[in-house]
Image (cartoon, helix red, strand yellow):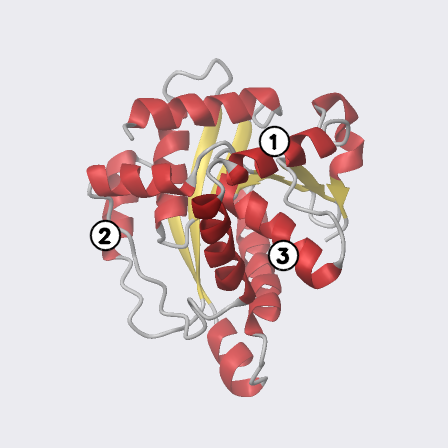
Amino acid sequence: MDLQRVLSQTRKAVDDFHMIEEGDKIAIGISGGKDSLTLLLALKGLQRFYPKHFDLYAVTVDLGFKDLDLDKIVAMCKELEVPYEVVKTDIGKIVFEDRKESNPCSLCANLRKGALNDAILRTGCNKVAYAHHKDDMVETFLLSMIYEGRFHTFNPVTYLDRTGITVIRPLMYMNEADVIGFVNKNNIPVVKSPCPADGHTKREYVHLLLQRLNHENPGVKQRMFRAILTMNQDAWNPLNFEKNKEDK
C-alpha cells in the first residue's frame, strides 16, 4: 500500500466522523509499532493539504523496560518536523515487579493512558489520535462479547470528561494487512515492544481467532466491521456527539 491510499482511507474516517476541526492541536500516541508510525505519517501527510489547519505533537510513554531504542523515531519526527516527547515512567516495574499482575494489560493500559493524558495537557493539545485500525475494532468487539458478555468496541470519536481531551481514531478504515504492507514497502523503522506480556494476551488469542475465522470464511472480518458500523450508526453520528462521551 502506498501513502496515497493511506491518506485516502484516513481522510474518509476523519471526514465521516468529523475528527478534525480548525485549530486543533493533536497529540499522537507513539508506541514505536507499525500502527502508530503509520498514523504519524498519515496525519502528517493529511496536514499538508487538509482544508482545516491543525498542529501535531508526538508522545511516547516509556514504560521503563530495557532495550527500548527510540533513536530512529526521534530522527523520523525531526525529519517530519513534528515535536516529539518521551515520557519516562516506572509503569513496567509497578505492573510486573511491585504488583506482579497475572493479567497485566488492563492496569498497564490505565497507567499508560494517565501518563499520556498528563503529557497531552502539558502541551496544550485538545485531541489525541490513537492508531486503532479495523482489525483492532473487530477484535475489541469479539473480546467484549467473549469475556464481558456485551456488544462494545472503540468509538471513532470519544470525549473524555475528566481531562477535556477528545480521542480520535483516524485509521479505523484500514486493514492491519494494509498497515503491514505500507510499513514494509516504505522501510518504516518499527520498534519491537519490550513488554514481557507481548504476544501472550487475550487480545492476541482473539487476534489469531479472527485470522482463522477470516481464512475459513473469506470476508467475515469485513462483514463483522460492517455490522459494527450498522449497530452504532446512531451513536456514532457526529450530530449525536454527546452520546460518545466517556468519563475516564
Q: Which residue is mark 3?
A: 143
Residue 156 location, x and y as percent? 62, 35
* First-in-chain label (1 vs 3): 3
Give the quadrant of the N terminus: top left
Quadrant of the rendered image containing residue 224: top right
Q: Nearer the viewer, residue 247 or 230?
A: 230
Count residues near mark 2 (Cα–Cα under 10 Å), then give few for <14, some for 14-19, many for 20+.
Answer: some
Q: Which mark is residue 226?
A: 1
Q: Which mark is residue 201?
A: none
Count residues near mark 1 (Cα–Cα under 10 Å), then give few for <14, some for 14-19, many for 20+.
Answer: few
Q: From the image, state whether disc 2 or disc 1 is nearer to you.
A: 1
Q: Which residue is mark 2?
A: 72
Mark 2 belongs to which amino acid?
A: Lys
Mark 3 belongs to which amino acid?
A: Leu
Residue 97 location, x and y as percent? 50, 86
Cα–Cα span, label 2 and label 1: 37 Å
Q: Nearer the viewer, residue 90 or 2?
A: 2
Position of residue 11 relative to residue 226, above or below, is: above
* First-in-chain label (3 vs 2): 2
Residue 57 location, x and y as percent? 44, 41
Mark 3–mark 2 contact, CB under 8 Å? no
Circle 3 — which element? helix
The residue furthest front is: 216
Cα–Cα span, label 3 and label 2: 33 Å
Q: Which residue is rendered at x = 70% and y = 40% of the image?
A: 159
Cα–Cα span, label 1 and label 3: 17 Å
* First-in-chain label (2 vs 1): 2
Mark 1 belongs to which amino acid?
A: Arg
